Amino acid sequence: MSRQPSWLLWSTPPTVLLVIAFGLWLRLDHAGPTGLDESWLDLVGLVQGSVPYRIAVVLAEVGGGTGVVICTALLAGIFVLGRRWRSAIFLVTTMLAGIAASEILKAVVTRLRPGDQLYESLGFSYPSGHSMGAAALAMSLAIIACRRHQLRRSEAQAVRDSAYPVADSAAGPKADRTPAPRMGFHWSFILAGIWILAMMWSRTALQVHWLTDTIAGAFIGIAVAVLADEFWTLTATRTRSARFALWLAG
């Protein structure tokens, strides 16, 4: 089973620590917006009733708590019906971890939202829960799609290799000692990036979050997806139960 790229795994913990450190700085020394936050809010402000405003509101409704729960439940149910157990448990784990991390940071940092909101939103500002949810969900689905694509390629390669059993038998003993392959790029990651950026724009354009709130939320969502995927990958490869490993590989 393929693992996340090394550079992504190594960069995830420092990114999470940076988000936490910035939040603590906001809590202890700089509760208000930064200069970048104020400049960005002035740049992306919307006119109520305009088409961009309505698009931003739709994104806000879809990416809200109820919308995220419904989307997660529906997708997990689809995966379960298709007997894709790993995809279902990975998606649910990612979303639960992301929500927990986001809510804990909000309670610790207690940053206030912008004053002139164009869309009613309650609670503390840092990090953006909408951006976190969008990133966690989109990144999870992109990873699932990428793994599915690689699995199909591996199965096709196995079929081709089976046509040459003599040639493959010489390489057989070495294959067991090769390290686990790394995940490659898949077009679904582009769609995930577009969705995350759209949600970040929506939250700042509606004046309910500062830019740094949305950046932190996106980083948290991506991080929990990467770490959850790595956790279940290592669990599947190291478990002594063949049935459990097969269940996680599904």
Image: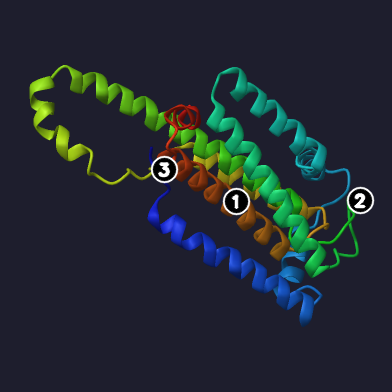
Task: Tell me where residue 215 appears, x and y as whole percent.
Answer: 65, 60
Q: Earlier in the sequence, mark 1 or mark 2?
A: 2
Front one among 119 and 121: 121
Instruction: Give the number of callouts.
Output: 3
Reading the image, the residue beneath label 1 is 224
Q: Is residue 49 visible?
A: yes
Above or below: residue 224 compared with residue 35: above
Q: Is residue 126 visible?
A: no
Would you identify the image quadrant in which residue 220 lies? bottom right
Q: Is residue 5 left or right of residue 173?
A: right
Asked whether disc 2 touches disc 3, contact meaning CB atoms under 8 Å apart, the reply is: no
Front one among 44 and 219: 219
Disc nearest the viewer among 1 and 3: 3
| Residue depicted at x 52% and y 60% | 12
| Residue depicted at x 41% and y 58% | 7
Checking the image for residue 238, the label placed there is 3
Above or below: residue 136 compared with residue 215: above
Disc nearest the viewer among 2 and 3: 3
Q: Quadrant of the N terminus?
A: top left
Identified by mark 3, the residue type is: Arg
Label 2: element kind: loop
Label 1: element kind: helix
Above or below: residue 82 compared with residue 224: above
Q: Earlier in the sequence, mark 2 or mark 3?
A: 2
Reading the image, the residue beneath label 2 is 120
